[in-house]
Amino acid sequence: MQRHQIVLYLIAIVFGAVLGLQVSSVRPSLEASINPFLGLLLYATFLSLPLTKLLVSFRDLRFMAVLGLVNFVLVPAIVFILTRFIADDQALLYGVLLVLLAPCIDYVIVFAGIAGGDSTRLLAATPLLLLLQVLLVPAYMFLIAGSDTLALIDPKPFLRALLGLIVVPFIAAFLTQLLMKRFAFAVRIGSWADYLMVPLMMGTLLSVVGSQINAVASQFQNLATAIALFVVFVAVMAAISTAVGKLFHLETAPLRAVTFSGVTRNSLVVLPLALALPPELSLASAVVVSQTLVELVGMLVLIQLVPRFVTAKSGINDHKGLI
């Protein structure tokens, strides 16, 4: 499965799309399964990471500074430029701003790890990324879209996502790692976690695509401009994030992690915010969903490209782990 994971992920996406478009009755069940799949996927991911080294990772000030620069200085600048094309359409504008201004805190860890990125450093950066986006996304929306946006932002979905998708799986993985030192059943759980990574990612992709594809397909004409912007965003931010990481002389694994962080957005977390918008802005939720679908395809492309092309100039310390 590891050897053929990209093909399996594409199969999951295609099957989810067909299922979501042809069998409407399964969409609510698929939507309800997104967070359980994602939580289990992150539990398996955390279980494979050296969690005892997280504090060391958090102290990597250069990596944290690059993440902050990419996600909260450069991304807003790029988003401002891109949204000039839809500035007159409030629903499109709000949806694009909501999803592109918020960096991902969950499956970016998985995708970056698949491509050889430093998952441990990304996990250590999660609380900082979450705190900064809760504080800065409303401010950037105010600057770009006007004062009316402040009443639309509720931090509760961010906090629920942190608890359900990061804190609970992290604690469960940490306890499992402790038990692995004493009990054979915990060791078996740890070994099975590696085998389940690909099926859990397939389940996540299938549930996201299957539950959301119809919303995008039914409004594709209205969403076409936003979808084009999302494609451009993936390409531009992949290049910019990599360039900035190289400018700060990051090693290969942290550099790849920064590349993925600059591209991936917090769509599964901000979707409840979009759904809570007034009826006249209902298109914003479909905008967020369309970004999710574009991003998933983009991630599969980057998993192939990043290991080939994103490499530090000098990788002499890459194999030594956390410093």
Image: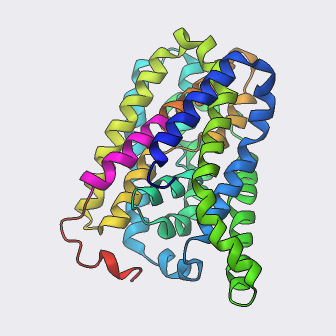
State the predominant SS element of the stretch in magenta.
Answer: helix
* Near-viewer residue (315 or 147): 315
Residue 136 lies, in percent from the top left, at 55, 49
Q: Residue furthest bottom?
A: 182
Residue 312 lies, in percent from the top left, at 24, 64
Q: Residue furthest left?
A: 313
47 in relation to 139, above or below: below
Residue 279 lies, in percent from the top left, at 75, 17
* Near-viewer residue (113 or 194): 194
In magenta, the rendered stretch is: 296-310
* Residue at image point 55% right, 72% down: 49
Image coloring type: rainbow
Q: Decide whether residue 190 is among the magenta residues.
A: no
Q: Decide whether residue 302 is among the magenta residues.
A: yes
Q: Residue furthest top?
A: 221
Q: Is residue 155 left or right of residue 47?
A: right
* Near-viewer residue (318 or 254): 318
Quarter of the image containing the C terminus? bottom left
239 in relation to 216, above or below: below
Residue 285 lies, in percent from the top left, at 66, 26
Count of numbered badges drawn on the protein: 0
* Residue at image point 39% right, 35% down: 233
Q: Is residue 113 left or right of residue 137?
A: left
192 in relation to 240, above or below: below
Q: Is residue 155 visible?
A: no
302 in relation to 20, above or below: below
Q: Is residue 118 visible?
A: yes
